[in-house]
Image (spheres, rainbow, N blue to C red):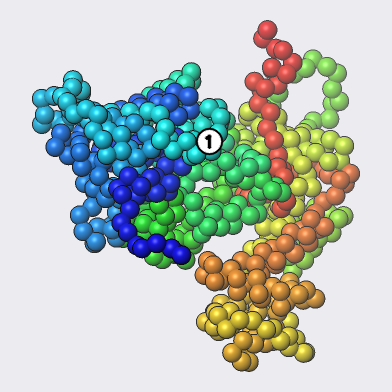
Amino acid sequence: MLGRIHILPAVVANQIAAGEVVERPASIVKELVENSLDAGATQILIQTEQGGINRILVRDNGHGIHRDDLPRAFARHATSKIRSVDDLFVIGSLGFRGEALASIGSVARVEIQSRTEAQSQGHALAMVGDEVLHDRPVAHPVGTSVEVRDLFFNTPARRKFLKTERSETQAIDATLKRLMLAEPEVAFEVALGGSKFVLPAGAMEQRLARILGEDFPARSIHIDERRGPYRLHGWVGLPTFSRGHADHQFFFVNRRVVRDKLVAHAIRQAYRDVLFGARHPVFVLNLDLPPESVDVNVHPTKHEVRFREARDVHDFIFGMLNRALRDVRPDDTQQRGSPASATELVTAVPEQPALNLPLPRTEVPSVSWRYAQVDPVEQAAGLSQERLVGSGVDQRRIPQVHDAGAVPPSRVVPPLGFALAQLHGVYLLAQNSSGLILVDIHAAHERIVYERMKEQRRQASPQMQSLLIPIIVPVSEVEADLAEEHTELLADSGLVIDRMGASTLRVKAVPLSLAGGDAAAMLIDVLGDLAEMERSERIENRALDLLATLACHSSVRANRPMSIAEMNALLREMEVTENAGQCNHGRPTWRELSLEELDRLFLRGR
């Protein structure tokens, strides 16, 4: 039989709270650094010994803590960041509960030294649980230093669950990476055991290179988009700069590191068409929105948030990222410049110095534009293997060989240059102003055809097939209510349903992409998505998968001979096609070898 109800001692209560807040040394580093950031620090020093188990020191140049407030800092639910219930709904600080120091002090030996600008000297307070070890004045600059020693010294059972020094150090390093990326205007000096480094304030590209790899700044897109109260800014890696694990993904909401299913889904959908296999994108993104639009008080470690307008946030993130990725063109990946217009892409075959070899007396004609009429029906449906121009490449853009004198002189070299040759019927070789371009012909043409098909589908009304015998789908009452609420949304996707009873739905028509498939299973999956995220892309994804298959089978095959004019036409189409850097399966469509890389390959200049 259980005993009578009684009030727990403060030490026990604090250790229970510590079980939520202090999981490992990295948790302490996170809480202390966030306190420094909330105090307005612009310089933060972090030192650890033995993976933070023996010692953690965090020192900042923030506003400091008044000497009379130091004892209160160790009390539970004591904070300077909120004062009333209303403040919980407009939280602008990283911390607000007032539990961190009390929790840390219950499982370790803690000393705080601090000084405010109004004080002539600092003050130090050291505590273990409720016991004050010393309380005295000290010499200290404006700011705060918190030193934590002997973590879990009084709870040996918890100390046994800590991992090796190396693992704990890596966890601290991962925590600091997230904080450093969230606060580019704060300088960090870090010493984790024998590893030391300094990151100056404002050097964001240096931080990106150190944390995400030296190639990331050059192989990412910087975005800064606004719509209504929302702002999304940061860096997203190109689809070709992806990883096998989701370990280089950083998302911040009002400077706070968060893990959110809705955000993850929006980003995954934005990369859907361009990532290969099970690869994961790399990104550092910040979402700024009014504090009252997001609830951060839903998890003890504050890693999870709840958005007031979840669907709007999802659509905003997806729309901005999807547009940024679609707008990438070959010249963006080379020089981050704006693409040349179609009228500028009129030029002769690039000039090269004479090789002093016997040449045929036949002159090489110039390549320029000739606009040809094309039947729009034939253009939309013509997927012939015999003629490239009939399978997705716009005939109006095909360069024709004719008298160069009829063309205005222009020397602009397009981003993907001019075709030189076809290699083994599979690859296209071209020369641009930087070096050599290699193109996978089938992959590039596949993307062009796919984007054309997607555009035609967007402009047409959804195609559906009425069922001679409707499909009866048993569901829960909650799912039936959800289906009834979203009837119009489902109909817009081609899935026509009605409700027959409290827990029965009837499917009367399905999208053509679902014809012959398991419509009942798809409906259940769609309702699950609607319940979790208020939206579903399953039907759309199924349709796009079908288009991708058609585009793959309708594209130029290997060993199909191509003329120089056709190869140049393919290059020009790539330069104006969305997502042209990857095929429908996420494989790259082209690569560039610069002259410097070619020189290194052949040891030139050595």
Looking at the rendered structure, the number of numbered marks drawn on it comes to 1
Q: Position of residue 492 (x, y in %)?
A: 59, 77
Left/right placement of residue 20 relative to residue 339 reads left
Query: Quick check: can you spot residue 518?
Result: yes
Q: Is residue 173 above or below residue 230?
A: above
Crowd tier of the residue under label 1, counting other residues whose Cα lies within 10 Å: few below 14, some 14–19, many 20 or above: few
Residue at horizontal 83 percent and vertical 54 percent from the top: 387
Q: Is residue 468 above or below residue 447?
A: below
Q: Nearer the viewer, residue 401 or 482?
A: 482
Q: Nearer the viewer, residue 79 or 527?
A: 79
Q: Nearer the viewer, residue 226 or 489?
A: 489
Left/right placement of residue 407 relative to residue 250 reads right
Left/right placement of residue 68 relative to residue 459 reads left
Quarter assignment of residue 330: top right
Query: Quick check: can you spot residue 205?
Result: no
Left/right placement of residue 307 relative to residue 379 reads left
Residue at horizontal 69 percent and vertical 63 percent from the top: 544
Q: Amino acid at mark 1?
A: Lys
Q: Is residue 313 above or below residue 365?
A: below
Q: Position of residue 46 (x, y in %)?
A: 38, 27
Quarter assignment of residue 503: bottom right
Of the 4 image quadrants, the one containing the C terminus is top right
Q: Position of residue 272 (x, y in %)?
A: 63, 55
Residue at horizontal 47 percent and vertical 36 percent from the top: 156
For the view shown, which residue lies furthest in the bottom direction?
A: 500
Q: Considering the numbered disc 1 on the image, is that residue within a helix, a strand or a loop?
A: loop
Q: Position of residue 223 (x, y in %)?
A: 46, 45
* Residue where numbered disc 1 is placed: 160
Residue at horizontal 79 percent and vertical 30 percent from the top: 363
